[in-house]
Image (cartoon, rainbow, N blue to C red):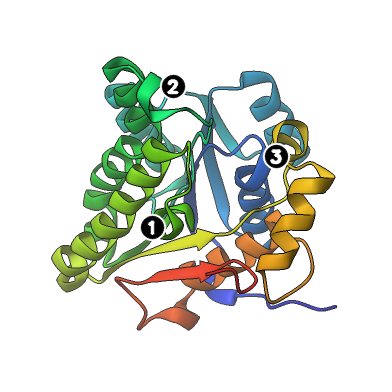
Amino acid sequence: MAFASYPSLQGKVVFITGGASGIGATFVQSFHDQGAKVAFVDLDDAAGQALAQKLGGAWFRRCDVTEAEALQAAVRDAGEALGPVTVLINNVANDTRHKAAETSPEAWRRGLAVNLDPAFIASTAAYPMMKQAGGGVIVNVSSINALLGPAELAGYAAAKGAINSMSKSLAREWGPDNIRVNALSPGWVVTARQLELWLTPEAEAEWMKQVALKRRILPEDIARLALFLASDDSQMITGQNLVIDGGRT
C-alpha cells in the first residue's frame, strides 16, 4: 500500500514532544522520512538518543516537560540549531488509569502537568518563531477519551477535553498570523505500552465489537494524519478536532 508524500514538509523544522517511543517515535520517523528537520524531546534519554542516532542527526534533548522553563528553552534552542520551528506536534501524554475517589489533589495536578500544560507552553514558545516566519502549524494530540469519558480516566479525559478547546481558541487567536491549530483524537492505538499494560485479548475483542473497521489502529495511522495536517495540503483546516478511531465514536 502506497501512502502520500508532502513536498511542503521538506526542510520544515518540526518540534515533537514525547518523541522517543510509541506514537511520538513514529511521528519523529515519519516527519524525518518526509525530509523535515526534526527536533524532539523526551524524558527517556536512552531511547531518545538511540532514535536520534538511527535517523542520523535528528535534534534531541532529554526534557521533563512538566518544567516549563526547560520546555521553553528546548523549543528556542531547537529553533536556533535548525531554523525557526514552524511545525509543532504536542504529543506527550500519560494515560495511567486511576480511581477518581482515590486521586489526591497533587496527583490530579501532576496529570494536568503532563497531559495539558506542555501543549500550551510549547505552543506559546513556538509562536514568535511561527509569526516571524509568516505562519506555522500546531497539531495537538488529543484522545477520543475526551469524547467518551471512560471510567478511571477522569484526569486524562479532562485534560484532553481542554486540549480540544484550547486548540480551537488558539486557532482563532493566531489565525491572522497564518498559524493553524488542530487537534487529532486517536482511538485505542496499539503501542508497546498498551500491549504491556492494558491491551489483553479480551479487551481487544471488546474494542473490536465497538468499532466499524475491524482492525488495529497503528501509530503509523496517527502519523499519516499528522503529516497531512502539518502540510500545505490542509491549508484551510484549522480549529478542528479530527477523530481517527476506526469508527468507535
x then y, percent, for residue 213: 73, 75
For marks 3 and 1, give the one nearer the viewer: 3
Tell me how far mark 3 sits from mark 1, CA to CA.
31 Å
Q: Tell me which residue sits at (49%, 45%) in the image.
A: 91
Choose top left, top right, bottom left or bottom right for residue 33: bottom right
Q: Residue 194, labelled with which disc?
A: 3
Residue type beneath disc 2? Asp
Which residue position is annotated with label 1?
A: 86
Choose top left, top right, bottom left or bottom right for residue 209: bottom right
- What element does badge 1 sit on? loop
Q: Tell me which residue sits at (47%, 67%) in the image.
A: 230
Which residue position is annotated with label 2?
A: 64
In this rendering, position of residue 40 left or right of residue 224: left
Residue type beneath disc 1? Thr
Tell me how far mark 2 sits from mark 1, CA to CA.
22 Å
x then y, percent, for residue 157: 40, 46
For marks 2 and 3, give the one nearer the viewer: 3
- What element does badge 2 sit on? loop
In this rendering, position of residue 170 left or right of residue 141: left
In this rendering, position of residue 60 left or right of residue 191: left
Residue ranking furthest to the front: 101
Residue type beneath disc 3? Gln
Q: Residue 28, labelled with which disc?
A: none
Label whose residue precedes the other's in the sequence (2 or 1): 2
x then y, percent, for residue 21: 67, 36
Tell me how far mark 2 sits from mark 3, CA to CA.
22 Å
Label whose residue precedes the other's in the sequence (2 or 3): 2
Choose top left, top right, bottom left or bottom right for residue 50: top right
Q: Tell me which residue sits at (29%, 71%) in the image.
A: 239
In this rendering, position of residue 39 left or right of residue 66: right
- What element does badge 3 sit on? helix
**In this rendering, does residue 66 appear at all?**
no
